[in-house]
Amino acid sequence: MTTSVYNIPVKSIDGKDINLNQYQGKVLLIVNVASKCGLTPQYEGLEKLYKEKKDQGLEILGFPANNFLEQEPGTNEEIQQFCSLTYDVHFPLFSKISVAGTDKHPLYQALITAIPERIGEGPWWKDLVDYGLTPNPKPEILWNFEKFLVNKNGDVVARFAPDITADDPRILEAIETELKK
C-alpha cells in the first residue's frame, strides 16, 4: 500500500500552515528529530547529505518530537536556534509534533501505516531494553531519528531504524535509486 504525504497539513518551524505538496517531484527523507538525545549528532550527517544531494532533488524534512524521554523539550524557536547554531542545519524543520501515542500527528500515522517494518532493526532495540527502557512495539516509531524515504510521487517507499545514519550504505542506495527515477 502506498500513501501520499502531500496533502497532510503540517506547520513550518515558524508556525505557518503548509502542505508537503510544495515538495512534489522531490525525494524526501522525513526524520523525527530531538535536540537532547544520544542520536542528536546525526544532525551533522543529515546536513552533509542534504548539501550533497539537494541539487539532485533530495529534501530532508525534520520533525521535532518530544515523545522519547522528553528529549525535545524546547520551543520551536529554541529548536531552530539550536539546530542552526550547533549543527548549521539548512534543511527544512517543522513545528514540534507527536510521533507516537494517542496524539500522533496524521503524517506519522500515514508513514507508519505505509511502511510498518524498519530496515536495520538490530542492536539498537536491545540497547534500549538494556538501559531499562520499554521501546514502542512494532509498527510504532522506536525512537528519535527514525527515517522514512518518500519517492517523487509522495509514496512512502522505505523506513530506517534510528541508528541507521545518513551515511549508511542502505540509506544512500535507497536514496540514489529514488533520485534516478
Image: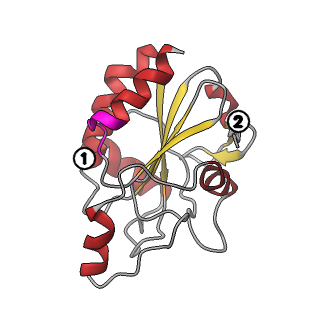
Count of number-bearing discs: 2
Q: Label 2 neighbourhood size at 10 Å, few (<14), some (14-19), many (20+)?
A: some
Q: Is residue 178 above or below residue 30?
A: above
**Which of the 4 image quadrants contains residue 87?**
top left
Give how far across and how far down residue 157 sits, in percent: 56, 37
Q: What range of the chain is rendered magenta?
A: 165-170
Q: Amino acid at mark 2?
A: Tyr
Say if mark 1 contacts mark 2, CB within 8 Å.
no
Q: Is residue 169 magenta?
A: yes
Q: Is residue 79 left or right of residue 141?
A: left
Residue 89, visible in the rendered structure? no
State the residue lying farthest toward the bottom: 132
Q: Amino acid at mark 1?
A: Thr
Q: Which of labels 1 and 2 is toward the front?
A: 2
Of the image marks 1 and 2, the number of the one nearer the N terminus: 2
Query: Residue 151 or 170: which is nearer the viewer?
Result: 170
Judged from the image, the secondary structure of the residue bearing numbered disc 2 is: loop
Residue 111, numbered label:
none
Give how far across and how far down residue 137 sits, in percent: 50, 73
Using the numbered discs, state the Cα–Cα distance from disc 1 to disc 2 in whole angstroms.
30 Å
**Which of the 4 image quadrants contains residue 60?**
top left
Q: Which residue is mark 1?
A: 86
**Magenta-highlighted stretch: main secondary structure?**
loop
Question: Which residue sits at x=43%, y=28%?
Answer: 175
**Which of the 4 image quadrants contains residue 70?**
bottom left
Q: Is residue 101 left or right of residue 80?
A: right
Q: Is residue 128 magenta?
A: no
Q: Which residue is mark 2?
A: 6
Q: Is residue 47 left or right of residue 147?
A: left
Judged from the image, the secondary structure of the residue bearing numbered disc 1 is: helix
Q: Label 1 neighbourhood size at 10 Å, few (<14), some (14-19), many (20+)?
A: few
